[in-house]
Image: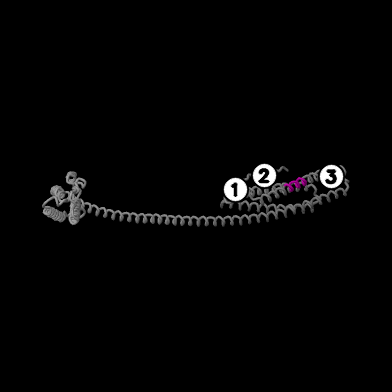
Amino acid sequence: MKKGKPKTTETKQTPGAMDAKEKSVYLSQIQDLSARLESLQRSCDKLKQQNHNEVKQKEHLSSTPEILQHSSAELDKEEEEVMEGLKKVRKLRPEDPELQKKAEELRSEVSEKATKLVDLQKIAEALRLLQVTSSSEAAAKPRVDSELLEQCWMSQMEEDMQDRKQEMEIKQNVFGYKYKLQRCLQELELAKSSRTSAEKQRDQALDTIKEMKLKSDSVLRNISSKQQLLKKRTRCELWSNEVKRLESSHQNQLDQNQADRQRLAALRDECLQEPSLIAQLKVQLQGEREKKMKAEREIQFSVSVLTPVMDSETMPGAQLMIQKVLSVLEKSKSRQTGIAHRETPELRRGGPKPQTSRAAALDRTSEPLPRQNVRPPPPPTPTCSQPSPGRAHLRLKKLDFWNTALNDLMNKLDETPSG
């Protein structure tokens, strides 16, 4: 009997890629396999019945090889069906190592059955040859020893009993494999249900993650909008403070401009009054110059008068000249007090206004004479006659008086304003 190697076309398929259609195909294939297993069971029953019939009809040796060939053909057919079922199971779950292991075990058992069938075929051929030889010997020698025939029958019966035991073991193994297959299917269903529940949980977790992400995005948008609003508010406050500061500075600038305008108006009025004031100051300067010249003349006159007065004994009329000098001093003193009363309001407020170059030139021309230019009175000329002590004392008093008077006059001339 020729056995063809099953062509296993393995398709790599993940458990998550199986859909409802593949599931239905898988269930239909499982049902086919169970139906085939039932057919194998029926065939085993048939074989059992056939063996029983063979036991009953052991005298009919001619029918034994045909029965064995028929049973071997059925076993070959069942073997092919089992191999196809294993192929389909392997196609459905190629990644399950337990199923692959079970498929290998089934394949090994099928190969053992095939070897046993080959042995049965050999036995059937030997029986056929024995039948042929026995028939030829019966034709040639009708008297064959019955003991040899009985021994052959006994050996054949023992072989039949062994075959029946093997068939029973095969049947039990088939039932065990069927139970294991059902358990594998149940485990597969549980795995699929657990996978679907895990997928549902994963989908729920993804949905919750998406919702949390949306909520976090909305919260972040709200926070960013609030931050932008706060920045704008602080910027507006800064701008309002800056505007207030600019308004206050603008108001201060307006006040300063108003004060500058008023000051400019006052300065303009003063500038308009400057020519009349300059003319007035020129007149005053001319009067002061004349007064200084007159005072210088008086000083020169007093000096010229004082030189001979130093010696009152040699000059007659000295007392009259002293009185004249005193009157001149009194007049100069009264004139000085009148000038002080006629000072301008500008001089009283804080000094005279700045003069022009022409007024400064006039002022320089009207400066008082330095003291070193005033010639001091000459010392008294010595006389031959020694003066008396009373006259000397009187002379000293006169000298002190004239010295104090001259110093007072010089101080007053220095204190006279220069214009």
Secondary structure category for the residue under label 2: loop
Whole-number angstrom distance, CA of label 2 to CA of label 1: 20 Å
Q: Amino acid at mark 1?
A: Gln
Q: Earlier in the sequence, mark 2 or mark 1?
A: 2
251 or 165, nearer to the observer = 251
> Which region shows up in magenta?
111-120
How many residues crowd around disc 1 within 10 Å: few (fewer than 14), some, or many (20 or more)?
Answer: few
First reached walking from the N terminus: tag 1 or tag 3: 1
| Residue 348 visible within the image | no
Judged left or right of residue 386, residue 225 is: right
Q: Nearer the viewer, residue 217 or 405?
A: 405
What is the number of the mark on residue 6?
A: 2
Residue type indicated by callout 3: Ser
Q: Residue at x 69, y 52 (%)?
A: 40
Q: Earlier in the sequence, mark 3 or mark 2?
A: 2
Q: Give the image location of residue 162, x and y in percent.
A: 79, 52
Residue 117 is a magenta residue = yes
Using a 10 Å C-alpha cutoff, classify the residue at mark 3 as few (fewer than 14 neighbours), some (14 to 19) or many (20 or more): some
Q: Position of residue 309 (x, y in %)?
A: 15, 51
Q: Which residue is mark 3?
A: 134
Question: Considering the numbered disc 1 on the image, is that residue within a helix, a strand or a loop?
Answer: loop
Residue identified by numbered label 1: 13
Residue depth check, mark 2 versus mark 1: number of the one nearer the observer: 1
Q: Quadrant of the N terminus?
A: top right
